[in-house]
């Protein structure tokens, strides 16, 4: 069975827009000249977008597809859900005050008059190699100034989504997540585009949420990772909004998280005399490796956290917490590997004059791992190998709901735990044991032979 939802057709197209870059290879095929405005029950829209009821079963319950690499900040949806059910200011009361009858008069209607912005997929639209099942397609019947949105009857007994959801959420996902099956009869206004390409969706999200300065730009790139590779943003904003900012955030996470081998060991203020890598050096190394090419240039090997990767050429939808956890996990496994393998070069450092600290393999002044060159070499190796093996390592399958702080150590801790469960964890452990066998001593290490000293001098020169 199918249902018809009446809609208004809104025509918006100017002749000057024909000068825009309509490049299908950049996910920018020419957009439609109109969109549609209608209302729909929030619970029904949820089902068509693929957001499923949460479960208490093991594992992280996820929707099938939140559109184009969308990430979900769960706390925001919980706040909205309380507002919808009880209005303001009751939704802001503490649990203790909610239980007190004296505050019952604070309950108000929880209106959400702002429209959800969505995209209706066409039959030919590809999402991770799949398209919408014919029975689930949402179609538009145009009739002069009006239109009818034809949808499958999701309330029909036995109906369930059979694959790719027919509708993608562009803006309003946290509002939509706030609704569960218990909230029936609550309609939301919807603005729907038909067959809007991926890059235009990112553009809409930017103009709605970031351009008016509604949300933190850095958080926005986590919520909508495709923005990281948009070339028009690179020309308009420059590098500082995301590349340098993200590199600094990751450096701070490596310095501040207690699980990190670099905990309190990065020279954050560039103080002279400290034999540790400076924050500026870390940022430069990350810019050259993991966060390079956020500007959207197609390179053979780009940054795992920014460049398009894999068969679909989309950036990994990892949040800051996941990115930081990935780096911390790799360095931690490397430190463990040095202890496990006990290579000769590490034994040599143990017997050198520099015995002021534990684990001299990584901390000695005679170790390249405690220098700009060693850090960058390590990051290059890890980034490039993971970049070319992104499909085999199933990196896109690592999902985690995100928090709303720039550097949340609690989110990083959760990400570290979940990282252990995916395929890349074993790969990292094996890679680190291999890297531990390389001689990481610097050219000034006193136990080097003349030949070793000359060779390392050439490498470091």
Image (spheres, grey):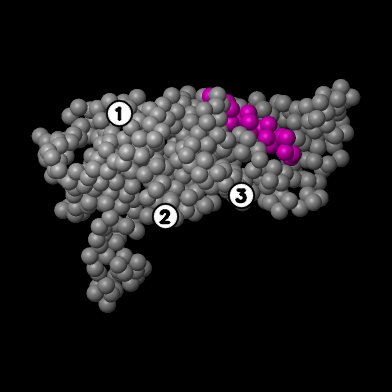
Circle 1 residue:
125
**Residue 373's spot in the image, x, y percent?**
73, 35
First in sequence, mark 1 or 3: give its number: 1
Q: Main secondary structure of the magenta part?
A: helix
Badge 3 marks a residue whose secondary structure is helix
Which residue is labeled 3 in the image? 252
- Characterize the local packing of mark 3: few (<14), some (14-19) or many (20 or more) Cα atoms within 10 angstroms: many
Assign the C terminus to one quadrant of the image.
top right
Residues drawn in magenta: 369-388
The image quadrant of residue 192 is top left
Q: Quadrant of the N terminus?
A: top left
What residue is at 21 percent from the left and 47 percent from the top? Answer: 37
- Is residue 460 toward the left or the right of residue 47 in the image? right
Can you identify the residue that label 2 sits on?
212
Q: Nearest the camera: 117 or 355?
A: 117
Q: Which mark is residue 114?
A: none
> Is residue 374 covered in magenta?
yes
Structural distance between the alpha carbons of marks 1 and 3? 40 Å
- The residue positioned 14% from the left and 43% from the top of the image is 146
């Amino acid at each position: 069975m199918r249902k018809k939802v009446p809609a208004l057709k809104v025509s918006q197209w100017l002749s000057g827009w024909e000068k825009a870059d309509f490049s299908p290879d950049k996910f920018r095929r020419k957009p439609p000249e109109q969109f549609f405005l209608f209302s729909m029950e929030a619970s029904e829209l949820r089902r068509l977008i693929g957001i499923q009821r949460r479960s208490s079963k093991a594992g992280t319950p996820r929707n099938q597809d939140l559109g184009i690499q969308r990430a979900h900040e769960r706390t925001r949806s919980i706040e909205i859900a309380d507002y919808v059910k009880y209005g303001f200011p009751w939704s802001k009361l503490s649990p203790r005050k909610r239980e007190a009858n004296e505050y019952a008069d604070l309950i108000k209607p929880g209106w959400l008059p702002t429209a959800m912005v969505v995209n209706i997929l066409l039959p030919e639209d590809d999402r991770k190699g799949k398209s919408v099942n014919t029975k689930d397609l949402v179609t538009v019947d145009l009739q002069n100034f009006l239109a009818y949105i034809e949808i499958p009857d999701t309330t029909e007994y036995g109906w369930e989504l059979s694959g790719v959801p027919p509708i993608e959420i562009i803006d309003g996902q946290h509002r939509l997540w706030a609704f569960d099956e218990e909230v029936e009869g609550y309609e939301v206004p919807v603005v729907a585009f038909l067959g809007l390409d991926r890059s235009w969706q990112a553009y809409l999200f930017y103009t709605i949420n970031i351009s008016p300065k509604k949300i933190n730009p850095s958080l926005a790139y986590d919520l909508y990772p495709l923005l990281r590779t948009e070339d028009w943003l690179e020309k308009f904003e420059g590098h500082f909004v995301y590349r340098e900012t993200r590199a600094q955030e990751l450096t701070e996470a490596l310095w501040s998280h207690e699980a990190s081998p670099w905990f309190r060991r990065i020279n954050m203020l560039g103080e002279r005399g400290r034999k540790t890598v400076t924050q500026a050096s870390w940022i430069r190394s990350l810019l050259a490796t993991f966060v390079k090419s956020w500007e959207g240039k197609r390179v053979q090997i780009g940054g795992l956290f920014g460049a398009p990767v894999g068969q679909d050429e989309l950036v990994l939808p990892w949040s800051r917490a996941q990115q930081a956890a990935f780096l911390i996990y790799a360095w931690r496994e490397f430190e463990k590997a040095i202890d496990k393998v006990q290579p000769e070069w590490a034994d040599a450092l143990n017997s050198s004059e520099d015995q002021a600290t534990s684990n001299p393999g990584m901390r000695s002044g005679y170790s390249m791992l405690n220098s700009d060159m060693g850090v960058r070499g390590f990051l290059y190796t890890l980034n490039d190998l993971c970049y070319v093996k992104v499909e085999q390592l199933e990196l896109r399958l690592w999902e985690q709901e995100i928090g709303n702080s720039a550097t949340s150590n609690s989110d990083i801790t959760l990400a570290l735990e979940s990282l252990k469960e995916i395929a890349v964890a074993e790969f990292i452990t094996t890679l680190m044991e291999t890297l531990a066998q390389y001689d990481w001593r610097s050219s000034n290490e006193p136990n080097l032979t003349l030949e070793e000293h000359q060779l390392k001098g050439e490498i470091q020169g």
